Image: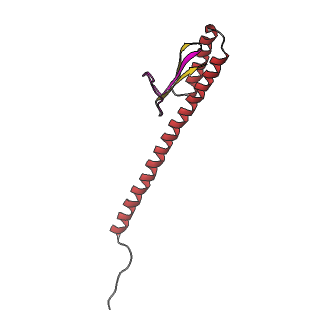
Amino acid sequence: MHMTLSGFSLLEVLISLVLLSFILLGFDATEIYSMRASRAAYYFDVANQQVSNMTERLIMVANDADLSSQIAIWNTENKIVLPQGKGQVIGHYPDFTIIVYWGNNSSFCTHNQLGNIGCINLHLIL
């Protein structure tokens, strides 16, 4: 009588489990990256809305006294809707530069930066 054993050995099962765990870790890493990218895009979108908000305020403001109070209100909103959000308006009517920073970005914003730390820089002529 010759008997053949069929089935999986313990070593094969362990190797399969290790391979499966690496595959699942890869899926987790992809999901984490996706969530970070989504958050960065969200911050950029909110900052873009804040730039539009300030653009509308600049169109409606008649004098510099009103402008400084509108910038103060706008910066209060920036702090609420963006992490460590702050904004800056440079210039005089009709030539302005609007800058919004978020995420502990203290450098001067020469171009738009997308990420958890970023900025938007818009030059505007009314």
Name the foreground residue: 40 vs 112: 112
49 or 27: nearer the viewer: 49
Q: Quadrant of residue 71?
A: top right
Say which of 115 and 20 sits in front. Answer: 115
Measured as percent of width and height from the top left, residue 64 is found at: 61, 8
Q: Is residue 99 magenta?
A: yes
Horizontal and vertical percent for residue 99? 52, 22
The image's colouring method is: secondary structure
Q: In the rendered view, would you say 12 is above or below 25?
A: below
Membership of 110 in magenta stretch: yes
Q: Residue at x 60, y 22 (%)?
A: 77
The residue located at (45%, 50%) in the rendering is 28
Instruction: Please name the residue shown 48% across and 48% down the image.
Output: 31
**Rendered-image quadrant of the N terminus:** bottom left
Along the viewing direction, whichever of 60 and 29 lies nearer the viewer: 60
Tell me the magenta residue range.
94-114
User: Is 1 drawn above or below residue 110 in the view shown?
Assistant: below
- What secondary structure prevails in the magenta region? loop
Give the x, y percent position of residue 105: 45, 25
The image quadrant of residue 92 is: top right
Percent x, y of residue 94: 59, 15
Image quarter where the C terminus lies is top right
- 43 horizontally vs 104: left or right: right
